Amino acid sequence: MTHRLIPTLCALALCLGAVPARADSEQDRARAALQAGQVLPLATVLARLEREQAGQVLEVELEHEDGHWVYEVKLLQAGGRLMKLEIDAATGAVLKRRVRDERR
């Protein structure tokens, strides 16, 4: 799973600093939250996730919802199942888990 995380980590690096963003954008707020220690680094969250869930990471988003940060992660699992997770970005705790079978 680690070799498949590289594109995701590169995309996050672009969002968190490698590409200039306009002032006070969602990327700026996410970067500030990371630097202030309000959110765990994506690498930390993905390492925990890799130990707990089998699957290939398809997409990761960092969203600010209802006053707190949430990582939204989509995993492709064996048999074509798609798992969507909402993870508390401050603690790494899974808040929601939805599984859908893509073979329909």
Image (cartoon, grey):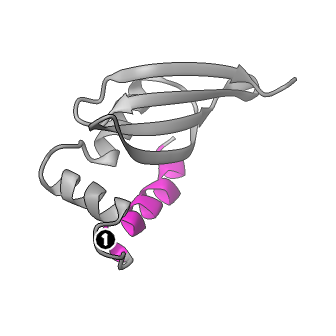
Q: Is residue 20 left or right of residue 104?
A: left
Image quarter of residue 83:
top right
Instruction: Give the answer, above or below, for where 47 lies relative to 5.
Output: above
Instruction: Return the x and y of residue 15 as percentages of the image width and height.
Output: 40, 65
Residue with the mark numbered 1: 17
Q: Is residue 3 magenta?
A: yes
Residue range in magenta is 2-18
The residue shown at (52%, 59%) is 7
Q: How many C-alpha atoms fall within 10 Å of the one at disc 1: few (<14), some, or many (≥20)?
A: few
Could you say where residue 69 lies in the image, as x and y percent from the top left? 30, 40
Q: Is residue 12 magenta?
A: yes
Q: Residue furthest right?
A: 104
| Residue at screen point 33% across, 46% down | 43
Residue at (23, 35) in percent of width and height:
90
**Residue 57, image x and y in percent?**
55, 41
Residue toward you, 60 or 80: 60
Q: Secondary structure at mark 1?
A: helix
In which quadrant of the rendered image does the C terminus lie?
A: top right
**What kind of secondary structure does the magenta stretch mostly adopt?**
helix
How many labels, in total?
A: 1
Nearer-the-camera pick, 73 or 6: 73
**Left or right, 20 with reference to 90:** right
| Residue at x-position 40% and y-position 45% | 63
Which of 28/78 is in front? 28
